[in-house]
Image (cartoon, helix red, strand yellow):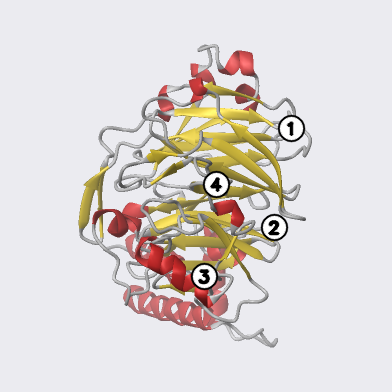
Amino acid sequence: MGVRGRFQLLIGAILFLQQTLANDNLRVAYQWSQIDFEFPSEADRANAIASGDYRAENVIPVGLEVYKRRLFLTLPRWKTGIPASLAYININETSSQSPKLRPYPSWNAHRQMAEGEAPEIVSPFRIRADRCGRLWVLDTGIEELLGAAKPLAPTSLLVYDLHNDNLLRRYKFPKDHVKEDSFYANLAVEDSDCDDTYAYAADLGAPGLVVYSWKTQESWRVKHHFFHPDPLSGNYTITGISFQWDDGLFGMALSRPQPDGFSTMFFHPLSSTNEFSVSTKILRNQTLATSGNIYKEFKVLGSRGPNGQAGVAFLDQKTGVIFYALPNLNAVTCWKTSNRAYTIKSLGRVYMSTTDMVFPNDVKVDDESNLWVLSDRLHQYMYGTLNPKDVNFRILTATVKDAIENTACDTKIKPLPDIITNLGDILRPSTTAAPPKSGAQAILISHMALLLTIFIKLIL
């Protein structure tokens, strides 16, 4: 091998080390074997267990949100025995890694107050806290989803005031929004104008998108071929459990407003490896969005590659980085929206683990630029059983800066010539004191120095 070839191998190895040694910076903040609640009293807890209203083995967190000092979790009514389907913990008051949950906004909101009357909140999957201090709750209205599937209430948007936890508005989806196979499991909120906010609800069962205007209190349903699943991407194998899903539109992430005042929506079906985009200028125009003449307004960005099916996605508007949950890979990845390429190489690995990240199910960034990820072993819950002696549910976190450091999404990543120049600095004596290096940085530098030494010996 010539000198040129050796040099290329060296640089490749250095870049590999730089990529791998600084990844997986998330830490486990909370974890549970089973979910428990703060009941009004121990007697109430005992009564709930005796009556079957609380069956710990049936409770599983699916959606996540963080607003100020509260961390919210959705707990859909997949089975019986779910005493509350939306709850929270106070981050400041929590000393345990497995805290009990408090129903939101109250216990009464999850109870049938009269015979034949649905609870205020039935079974939400995803929630979103906007910058205006409102919590948007997308409620399916269905209980026992893995059993008899009983509709208790219409699919609805509930909006709460997070300053006092009062219900501001309930919007029931019109009948023509709910098709035979409809299942609304995710939402995004465009909140640049608090008085003219738009919510987007994804229907993964009968692929479509519902657009809701806060200002006019109206909604419309948008159709597009890109909302449909890819028939070649329906196979999943996670920790030895194989199954098939044909879920359509699911992941949605909104950019900051563009120069024209509208956001870009990045989206994908769950059973697909492709990513798409469209301007909300198209979606927010009811006449245009429902006309059927918008096909060319939707863009194909690229593919995440084999096993790259993505669940939820969230875009950090400060950095322009989208975070993706990849259940088939037990991983969270990222993509920098300023990157024109959308390929496997342009995606960064944020975290991957067959222990801590088994079925990542929600991803959010809070207003303090912290990334939060929920993993919950959903596939095992649906197609097997969860071992109550294992840790089944985890919430991991890191600052966005740490999460994307030295990945393809790093906003401060150095170009190759700078890396080559710094190789010389590693071995060149310095006359000034250098700041202390972190453990990962020290390891990286030592490996780079060793590689450079080997390279020099090879060419001399």
Q: Is residue 239 left or right of residue 208?
A: left
Which quadrant: the N terminus? bottom left
Precedes in sequence: disc 4 or disc 1: 4
Q: Which mark is residue 119?
A: 4
Horizontal relation, residue 14 to residue 212: left or right: left
In the rendered image, residue 453, in percent from the top left (x then y), is placed at: 40, 80
The amino acid type, in three-letter code, at marker 1 is Pro
Which tag is nearer the camera, tag 1 or tag 2? 2
Q: CA distance from mark 4 to mark 2?
A: 31 Å
Label 1 to label 2, Cα distance in Å? 23 Å
Residue occupied by mark 3: 44
Q: Residues within 10 Å of mark 1 (few under 14, many from 20)?
A: few
Q: Secondary structure at mark 3?
A: helix
Q: Residue 367: which disc?
A: 2
Q: Is residue 333 visible?
A: yes
Secondary structure under the numbered disc 4 in the rendered image: loop
Q: Quadrant of the C terminus?
A: bottom left
Residue type pointed to by label 4: Pro
Question: How would you rate the neighbour count of disc 3 (Cα within 10 Å): few for under 14, some for 14-19, many for 20 or more?
Answer: few
> Against 248, is 437 above or below?
below
| Residue matched to label 1 | 259
Amino acid type, callout 3: Asp
